[in-house]
Image: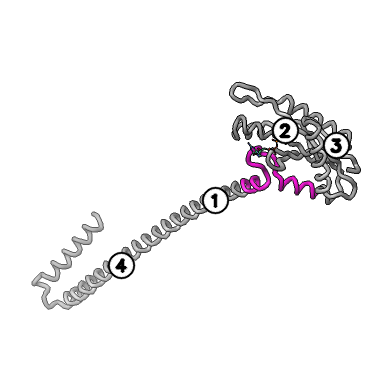
Protein backbone atom coordinates (compact mmCIF):
# COMPACT_ATOMS: atom_id res chain seq x y z
CA UNK A 1 0.00 0.00 0.00
CA UNK A 2 1.36 3.47 -0.91
CA UNK A 3 2.13 5.95 1.96
CA UNK A 4 -0.57 8.26 0.65
CA UNK A 5 -3.22 5.55 0.74
CA UNK A 6 -1.96 4.51 4.17
CA UNK A 7 -2.43 8.11 5.36
CA UNK A 8 -5.89 8.22 3.83
CA UNK A 9 -7.07 4.99 5.44
CA UNK A 10 -5.60 6.02 8.79
CA UNK A 11 -7.39 9.32 8.54
CA UNK A 12 -10.65 7.58 7.62
CA UNK A 13 -10.24 5.17 10.53
CA UNK A 14 -9.69 7.98 13.05
CA UNK A 15 -12.57 10.00 11.61
CA UNK A 16 -14.82 6.95 11.77
CA UNK A 17 -13.84 6.21 15.38
CA UNK A 18 -14.50 9.80 16.42
CA UNK A 19 -17.88 9.79 14.67
CA UNK A 20 -18.95 6.46 16.11
CA UNK A 21 -21.85 6.97 18.60
CA UNK A 22 -20.81 4.09 20.75
CA UNK A 23 -17.61 5.87 21.82
CA UNK A 24 -19.27 9.13 22.80
CA UNK A 25 -18.24 10.01 26.36
CA UNK A 26 -15.40 7.48 26.33
CA UNK A 27 -12.27 9.12 27.90
CA UNK A 28 -10.01 7.75 25.16
CA UNK A 29 -12.23 9.29 22.49
CA UNK A 30 -11.69 12.75 24.02
CA UNK A 31 -7.93 12.11 24.02
CA UNK A 32 -8.04 10.82 20.44
CA UNK A 33 -10.03 13.90 19.36
CA UNK A 34 -7.47 16.21 20.96
CA UNK A 35 -4.56 14.26 19.50
CA UNK A 36 -6.21 14.24 16.08
CA UNK A 37 -6.85 18.00 16.28
CA UNK A 38 -3.22 18.59 17.27
CA UNK A 39 -1.94 16.35 14.48
CA UNK A 40 -3.98 18.20 11.84
CA UNK A 41 -2.72 21.57 13.05
CA UNK A 42 0.82 20.28 12.91
CA UNK A 43 0.24 19.01 9.39
CA UNK A 44 -1.08 22.41 8.30
CA UNK A 45 1.96 24.11 9.84
CA UNK A 46 4.29 21.62 8.18
CA UNK A 47 2.69 22.27 4.80
CA UNK A 48 3.04 26.01 5.27
CA UNK A 49 6.72 25.68 6.23
CA UNK A 50 7.37 23.38 3.23
CA UNK A 51 5.67 25.87 0.96
CA UNK A 52 7.75 28.77 2.32
CA UNK A 53 10.93 26.72 2.01
CA UNK A 54 10.07 25.81 -1.63
CA UNK A 55 9.45 29.45 -2.45
CA UNK A 56 12.68 30.51 -0.77
CA UNK A 57 14.62 27.88 -2.72
CA UNK A 58 13.04 29.08 -5.97
CA UNK A 59 13.94 32.68 -5.22
CA UNK A 60 17.53 31.67 -4.30
CA UNK A 61 17.86 29.62 -7.53
CA UNK A 62 16.40 32.50 -9.53
CA UNK A 63 18.87 34.93 -7.96
CA UNK A 64 21.81 32.59 -8.55
CA UNK A 65 20.74 32.16 -12.20
CA UNK A 66 20.35 35.90 -12.81
CA UNK A 67 23.69 36.61 -11.13
CA UNK A 68 25.39 34.03 -13.36
CA UNK A 69 23.69 35.55 -16.41
CA UNK A 70 24.77 39.03 -15.36
CA UNK A 71 28.30 37.81 -14.80
CA UNK A 72 28.45 36.18 -18.26
CA UNK A 73 26.90 39.25 -19.89
CA UNK A 74 29.50 41.48 -18.26
CA UNK A 75 32.25 39.06 -19.25
CA UNK A 76 31.07 39.23 -22.88
CA UNK A 77 31.02 43.05 -22.68
CA UNK A 78 34.54 43.12 -21.26
CA UNK A 79 35.71 40.79 -24.07
CA UNK A 80 34.08 43.08 -26.62
CA UNK A 81 35.66 46.19 -25.08
CA UNK A 82 39.04 44.42 -25.04
CA UNK A 83 38.68 43.55 -28.74
CA UNK A 84 37.72 47.15 -29.56
CA UNK A 85 40.61 48.47 -27.49
CA UNK A 86 43.06 46.08 -29.25
CA UNK A 87 41.77 47.21 -32.65
CA UNK A 88 41.95 50.84 -31.58
CA UNK A 89 45.53 50.40 -30.38
CA UNK A 90 46.43 48.71 -33.68
CA UNK A 91 44.91 51.63 -35.58
CA UNK A 92 46.79 54.12 -33.41
CA UNK A 93 50.01 52.22 -34.04
CA UNK A 94 49.36 52.26 -37.83
CA UNK A 95 48.54 55.95 -37.65
CA UNK A 96 51.68 56.59 -35.67
CA UNK A 97 53.78 54.69 -38.21
CA UNK A 98 52.11 56.55 -41.08
CA UNK A 99 52.74 59.91 -39.36
CA UNK A 100 56.34 58.98 -38.69
CA UNK A 101 56.78 57.89 -42.31
CA UNK A 102 55.12 61.11 -43.55
CA UNK A 103 57.30 63.28 -41.36
CA UNK A 104 60.54 61.63 -42.48
CA UNK A 105 59.85 60.56 -46.06
CA UNK A 106 58.88 62.27 -49.28
CA UNK A 107 55.33 61.41 -50.33
CA UNK A 108 56.06 61.34 -54.09
CA UNK A 109 59.25 59.28 -54.26
CA UNK A 110 59.21 57.49 -50.88
CA UNK A 111 62.81 58.62 -50.29
CA UNK A 112 63.96 60.16 -47.01
CA UNK A 113 62.97 63.84 -46.94
CA UNK A 114 64.97 66.94 -46.13
CA UNK A 115 64.23 66.62 -42.40
CA UNK A 116 65.55 63.06 -42.15
CA UNK A 117 68.60 63.87 -44.30
CA UNK A 118 69.38 66.85 -42.07
CA UNK A 119 68.99 64.69 -38.97
CA UNK A 120 71.41 62.10 -40.36
CA UNK A 121 73.97 64.73 -41.40
CA UNK A 122 73.79 66.25 -37.91
CA UNK A 123 74.39 62.81 -36.40
CA UNK A 124 77.39 62.29 -38.66
CA UNK A 125 78.75 65.70 -37.64
CA UNK A 126 78.12 64.83 -33.99
CA UNK A 127 80.38 61.81 -34.14
CA UNK A 128 82.93 63.60 -36.34
CA UNK A 129 82.05 61.27 -39.22
CA UNK A 130 83.93 61.19 -42.47
CA UNK A 131 81.43 61.59 -45.32
CA UNK A 132 80.80 63.13 -48.72
CA UNK A 133 77.67 64.91 -49.91
CA UNK A 134 76.43 64.72 -53.49
CA UNK A 135 73.83 67.26 -54.58
CA UNK A 136 72.06 65.78 -57.60
CA UNK A 137 69.89 68.05 -59.71
CA UNK A 138 67.74 67.04 -62.70
CA UNK A 139 68.81 68.87 -65.88
CA UNK A 140 66.41 71.20 -67.64
CA UNK A 141 63.55 69.76 -65.69
CA UNK A 142 61.36 72.79 -66.31
CA UNK A 143 61.22 71.72 -69.95
CA UNK A 144 59.91 68.27 -68.99
CA UNK A 145 57.05 69.91 -67.13
CA UNK A 146 56.42 72.50 -69.81
CA UNK A 147 56.52 70.04 -72.73
CA UNK A 148 54.85 67.00 -71.17
CA UNK A 149 52.95 68.23 -68.14
CA UNK A 150 53.49 68.16 -64.40
CA UNK A 151 52.26 64.57 -64.07
CA UNK A 152 54.97 63.35 -66.43
CA UNK A 153 57.43 65.44 -64.44
CA UNK A 154 56.34 63.58 -61.32
CA UNK A 155 56.82 60.21 -63.04
CA UNK A 156 60.33 61.26 -64.05
CA UNK A 157 61.13 62.22 -60.44
CA UNK A 158 59.91 58.84 -59.20
CA UNK A 159 61.99 56.97 -61.82
CA UNK A 160 64.98 59.15 -61.03
CA UNK A 161 64.65 58.47 -57.30
CA UNK A 162 64.60 54.70 -57.94
CA UNK A 163 67.65 54.85 -60.21
CA UNK A 164 69.65 56.92 -57.74
CA UNK A 165 68.78 54.63 -54.86
CA UNK A 166 69.77 51.56 -56.86
CA UNK A 167 73.10 53.16 -57.79
CA UNK A 168 74.22 53.67 -54.19
CA UNK A 169 76.04 51.37 -51.81
CA UNK A 170 74.57 49.80 -48.72
CA UNK A 171 74.87 52.36 -45.94
CA UNK A 172 74.61 55.35 -48.29
CA UNK A 173 71.50 57.44 -48.10
CA UNK A 174 69.71 59.22 -50.89
CA UNK A 175 66.83 61.58 -50.17
CA UNK A 176 64.82 64.27 -51.85
CA UNK A 177 66.26 67.60 -50.82
CA UNK A 178 63.47 69.54 -52.53
CA UNK A 179 61.86 70.00 -55.96
CA UNK A 180 63.97 68.29 -58.61
CA UNK A 181 67.00 68.13 -56.32
CA UNK A 182 68.27 65.05 -54.49
CA UNK A 183 70.99 64.67 -51.89
CA UNK A 184 73.18 61.63 -51.30
CA UNK A 185 74.97 61.19 -47.99
CA UNK A 186 77.95 58.90 -48.48
CA UNK A 187 79.52 58.00 -45.13
CA UNK A 188 83.10 56.82 -44.64
CA UNK A 189 84.23 57.48 -48.15
CA UNK A 190 87.36 59.03 -49.69
CA UNK A 191 87.33 61.54 -52.55
CA UNK A 192 88.20 59.07 -55.30
CA UNK A 193 85.54 56.55 -54.26
CA UNK A 194 82.96 59.34 -53.92
CA UNK A 195 83.73 60.54 -57.45
CA UNK A 196 83.36 56.94 -58.67
CA UNK A 197 79.94 56.67 -57.02
CA UNK A 198 78.88 59.97 -58.65
CA UNK A 199 80.00 58.75 -62.09
CA UNK A 200 78.04 55.54 -61.57
CA UNK A 201 74.93 57.58 -60.72
CA UNK A 202 75.36 59.73 -63.84
CA UNK A 203 75.70 56.62 -66.02
CA UNK A 204 72.64 55.01 -64.41
CA UNK A 205 70.50 58.09 -65.06
CA UNK A 206 71.73 58.31 -68.67
CA UNK A 207 70.42 54.80 -69.25
CA UNK A 208 67.06 55.73 -67.74
CA UNK A 209 64.14 56.18 -70.15
CA UNK A 210 60.68 57.35 -69.21
CA UNK A 211 57.99 56.53 -71.79
CA UNK A 212 55.82 59.54 -72.68
CA UNK A 213 53.18 59.27 -75.45
CA UNK A 214 55.11 56.42 -77.11
CA UNK A 215 58.38 58.37 -76.96
CA UNK A 216 61.23 57.52 -74.60
CA UNK A 217 62.30 60.62 -72.70
CA UNK A 218 66.05 60.82 -71.92
CA UNK A 219 67.00 62.20 -68.51
CA UNK A 220 70.27 63.54 -67.19
CA UNK A 221 71.40 65.00 -63.90
CA UNK A 222 74.26 67.21 -62.75
CA UNK A 223 76.11 66.47 -59.52
CA UNK A 224 78.07 68.64 -57.12
CA UNK A 225 80.25 66.63 -54.76
CA UNK A 226 82.01 67.74 -51.58
CA UNK A 227 83.83 65.78 -48.92
CA UNK A 228 83.49 66.92 -45.34
CA UNK A 229 86.57 68.70 -44.07
CA UNK A 230 87.79 68.28 -40.51
CA UNK A 231 85.74 70.40 -38.11
CA UNK A 232 83.24 71.35 -40.82
CA UNK A 233 79.47 71.35 -40.19
CA UNK A 234 77.15 69.74 -42.73
CA UNK A 235 75.83 73.08 -44.03
CA UNK A 236 79.33 74.21 -44.98
CA UNK A 237 79.99 70.95 -46.81
CA UNK A 238 76.61 71.39 -48.46
CA UNK A 239 77.46 74.93 -49.57
CA UNK A 240 80.63 73.65 -51.25
CA UNK A 241 78.68 70.83 -52.91
CA UNK A 242 76.12 73.41 -54.17
CA UNK A 243 78.90 75.55 -55.60
CA UNK A 244 80.33 72.49 -57.37
CA UNK A 245 76.86 71.71 -58.75
CA UNK A 246 76.63 75.23 -60.17
CA UNK A 247 79.93 74.67 -61.94
CA UNK A 248 78.71 71.37 -63.36
CA UNK A 249 75.59 73.12 -64.70
CA UNK A 250 77.63 75.95 -66.18
CA UNK A 251 80.01 73.49 -67.82
CA UNK A 252 77.12 71.97 -69.79
CA UNK A 253 75.27 69.63 -67.32
CA UNK A 254 75.22 65.78 -67.22
CA UNK A 255 78.46 65.74 -65.25
CA UNK A 256 79.90 65.78 -61.76
CA UNK A 257 82.11 68.47 -60.29
CA UNK A 258 84.04 67.85 -57.13
CA UNK A 259 84.56 70.74 -54.72
CA UNK A 260 88.26 71.28 -54.07
CA UNK A 261 89.41 71.25 -50.47
CA UNK A 262 89.99 74.97 -50.68
CA UNK A 263 86.62 75.74 -52.33
N1 LIG B 1 56.55 67.75 -61.83
C1 LIG B 1 57.20 68.33 -60.83
N2 LIG B 1 57.99 69.39 -61.05
C2 LIG B 1 58.67 69.95 -60.03
C3 LIG B 1 58.57 69.47 -58.74
N3 LIG B 1 59.36 70.21 -57.95
C4 LIG B 1 59.94 71.16 -58.72
N4 LIG B 1 59.53 71.00 -60.00
C5 LIG B 1 59.89 71.77 -61.16
O1 LIG B 1 61.26 71.68 -61.45
C6 LIG B 1 61.60 72.77 -62.28
C7 LIG B 1 62.96 73.29 -61.93
O2 LIG B 1 63.29 74.24 -62.86
P1 LIG B 1 64.60 75.11 -62.81
O3 LIG B 1 64.96 75.42 -61.40
O4 LIG B 1 64.40 76.26 -63.73
O5 LIG B 1 65.72 74.18 -63.29
P2 LIG B 1 65.85 73.29 -64.59
O6 LIG B 1 64.75 73.53 -65.57
O7 LIG B 1 65.94 71.87 -64.13
O8 LIG B 1 67.17 73.73 -65.18
P3 LIG B 1 68.64 73.44 -64.66
O9 LIG B 1 68.55 73.06 -63.22
O10 LIG B 1 69.37 74.72 -64.87
O11 LIG B 1 69.17 72.35 -65.52
C8 LIG B 1 60.49 73.83 -62.11
O12 LIG B 1 59.74 73.90 -63.29
C9 LIG B 1 59.65 73.28 -60.98
O13 LIG B 1 58.27 73.55 -61.15
C10 LIG B 1 57.70 68.34 -58.51
O14 LIG B 1 57.53 67.84 -57.40
N5 LIG B 1 57.04 67.82 -59.57
Q: What residue sits 22% from the left and 59% below the top?
A: 6
Q: Are marks 4 and 2 in contact (CB under 8 Å)?
A: no
* Segment tinted magenta in the rendering: 97-123
- Mark nearest the camera among 4 and 2 is 2
Checking the image for residue 139, the label placed there is: 2
Q: Earlier in the sequence, mark 3 or mark 2?
A: 2
- Mark nearest the camera among 3 and 1 is 3
Q: Earlier in the sequence, mark 3 or mark 4?
A: 4
Q: Are marks 3 and 1 in contact (CB under 8 Å)?
A: no
Mark 4, ligand 1, within 8 Å: the answer is: no
Answer with the quadrant where ligand 1 appears in the image: top right
Q: Earlier in the sequence, mark 3 or mark 1?
A: 1
| Local secondary structure at mark 2 | loop
**Who is closer to the viewer here, 182 or 213?**
213
Q: What residue sits 85% from the left and 36% below the top?
A: 258
Residue under label 3, please give it: 258
Q: What residue sits 37% from the left and 60% below the top?
A: 61
Checking the image for residue 88, the label placed there is: 1
Give left or right: position of 159 versus 82: right
- Residue 148, by quadrant, is top right
Inter-mark Cα distance, 3 to 2: 18 Å
Disc 3 crowd rating (10 Å Cα; few below 14, some 14-19, many 20+) is many
In the depicted structure, whether residue 22 falls above or below residue 148: below
| Magenta run includes residue 138 | no
Residue under label 4, please give it: 52
| Local secondary structure at mark 4 | helix
Mark 2, ligand 1, within 8 Å: the answer is: yes
Amino acid sequence: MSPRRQDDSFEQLVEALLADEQYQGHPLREALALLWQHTREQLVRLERVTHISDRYQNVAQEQARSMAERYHRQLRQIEKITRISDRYQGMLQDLNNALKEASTHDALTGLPNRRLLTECMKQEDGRGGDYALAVIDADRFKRVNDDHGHETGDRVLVALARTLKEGLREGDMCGRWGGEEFLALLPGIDAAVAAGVAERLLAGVRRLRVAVDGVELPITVSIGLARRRDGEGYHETLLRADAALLEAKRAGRDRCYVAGDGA
